[in-house]
Image: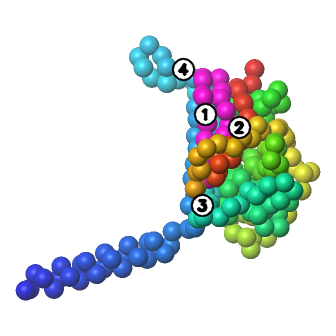
Amino acid sequence: MKMLRPLCCLALALAFATTVQAQDRPLSPRGEAAAHVGGAYNSEGSYENGSWVVVTYGRPILRGRDLFGAGDEYGQAFLRGAPVWRVGADQSTRFMTETDLTFRGQRLPAGEYSVFAELTENEWTLIFANWGVKNDFREENPDALWGAYGYTPDRDVLRTTMDVSTIAMSADQLNITFMDMTPQGGLFTIWWDDQVATVPFEVAR
């Protein structure tokens, strides 16, 4: 009986901690996608001379919603008054590359950028911009954005089209990933619900 009481207290404490942790979990957890480009494995099996390409973003969840829609309303439901999509949730999506890349022949210099997209049913436009990122939507910083609110194209560095298709499967949570990778590049891919958008990229020469 003496052992039972502290065990019960421990169980209650763990249950409370788990509940608090679940309540603290954001509705759109942060995620990361990463790729190594330009490198190779040496004769000893070690990877050398690669450059990182990393995307950090909020990962919204559908939770049963039909967000994309069709026609003129395609992709409008989750803009929530912003002029473009932040390609994620909450803080602006960030794209960091340690080496120059090319997207459809356009050069993106090494650096860190905010990423946005303009959406239509047949084609997306992917935007890399020199906007900074706010850590809180109340932050006062004229050179940074919370999501895509206040976006203007004057800080765009590169715009490129993305091929978009409707597939037979639905991703409940937004996925940004790198597909069909080779040492020189691959496909930058955005998949949410049954919409998949891709654009080829490679290490600049």
Q: Where does the magenta region start and end?
A: 174-190
**Residue found at x 87% / y 50%:** 155
Q: Which residue is drawn at 60% across and 28% down?
A: 181
The question of residue 198 being in magenta is answered with no
User: Which disc number belongs to residue 179?
Assistant: 1
* Nearer the observer, 151 or 117: 117
Q: Can residue 84 be seen in this view?
A: no
Report the residue that reaches farthest toward the top: 43
Point out residue 25 in the picture as x, y percentages from the top left corner: 51, 68
- C-alpha separation, residue under disc 2 versus residue under disc 3: 20 Å
Up the image or down, 130 lies above or below 19; here it is above
Which colour scheme appears in the figure?
Answer: rainbow
Residue indicated by mark 2: 198
Q: What's the residue at 83%, 67% (across, down)?
A: 81
Label 4 vs 3, first from the N-terminus:
4
Give the mark, 2 or 3, whose residue is nearer the N terminus: 3
18 w.r.t. 32: above or below: below
Give coordinates of residue 205: x percent, y percent. Answer: 75, 20
> Which residue position is annotated with label 3?
61
Q: What element carries label 4?
A: strand
Direction left: furthest residue = 1
In depth, the one of 162 and 138 nearer the eye is 162
The answer to whether residue 34 is visible is yes
Give me the residue at 33% from left, 77% from top: 15
Check disc 1: other Cα within 10 Å, few if <14, some if 14-19, many if 20+: some
The crowd level at tag 3 (other Cα within 10 Å; few <14, some 14-19, many 20+) is: some
Is the residue under label 4 in contact with that under label 2 (CB below 8 Å)?
no
- Amino acid at pointer 1: Met
